[in-house]
Amino acid sequence: MESESIGTIRWTLKKSFVTGPIADIEHRLDDEDAFEHIRCPLCGWHPAPSSLWPCYAAGTPEAPFEGCGTTWNTFATRGRCPGCAHQWRWTTCLRCAGWSLHDEWYEESPRR
Ligand SMILES: [Zn+2]
Ligand SMILES: [Zn+2]
């Protein structure tokens, strides 16, 4: 079957090019639905997959460390900086600029 073999080739390419944690992050970034259950505990703002947070410790409630300056979507990695692997406990809101614990951004997914 022609179509079947093409499908197999595509799958094989995908497997070889897209592996490891980076692919996992990209996959989750593509998934808009994943962000529906994330909101600012203070103002209710929903981050978008394109929202970016910088790794700068200055002016944050985070324990002092050397921020590496990477910008990334912190919800794609559950608060872990891909630049220096620092696990952020706090996440700032890009709308109200308030600080909340990263875990508090995740809504208990209610069954609708
Ligand atoms: Zn907010
Ligand atoms: Zn960093």
Image (spheres, rainbow, N blue to C red):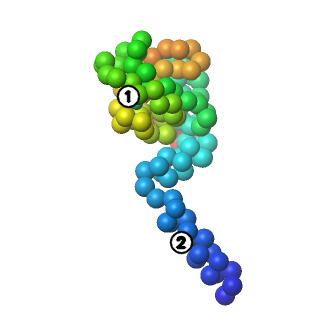
Looking at the rendered structure, the secondary structure element under dot 2 is helix
Most distant residue in the right direction: 2
- The quarter of the rendered structure image containing the N terminus is bottom right
Looking at the rendered structure, the secondary structure element under dot 1 is loop
Residue 26 rendering spot, x and y as whole percentages: 54, 48
Quadrant in which residue 52 is drawn:
top right
Between 37 and 30, the one lying in front of the other is 30
Circle 2: residue type: Thr
Alpha carbon separation for disc pair 2 and 1:
36 Å
Residue 80 rendering spot, x and y as whole percentages: 39, 35
Could one spot residue 41 in this view of the protein?
no
Q: How many marks?
A: 2
Residue name at image x 64 percent, y 81 percent: 4
Against 94, is 59 above or below? above
Residue name at image x 51 percent, y 38 percent: 110
Residue indicated by mark 2: 12
Q: Quarter for ligand 2? A: top left
Residue name at image x 48 percent, y 20 percent: 92
Residue 38 rendering spot, x and y as whole percentages: 52, 32
Q: Earlier in the sequence, mark 2 or mark 1?
A: 2
Residue indicated by mark 1: 88
Residue 53 rendering spot, x and y as whole percentages: 51, 27
Residue name at image x 49 percent, y 40 percent: 76
Quadrant in which residue 103 is drawn:
top left
Circle 1: residue type: Trp
Q: Rate crowding at label 2 as few (under 14), some (14 to 19) or many (20 or more) other CA atoms within 10 Å.
A: few
- The quarter of the rendered structure image containing the C terminus is top right
Is 21 situated left or right of 38 in this image?
left
- The verdict on label 1 being within 8 Å of ligand 2 is no
Could one spot residue 63 in this view of the protein?
yes
Most distant residue in the top direction: 59
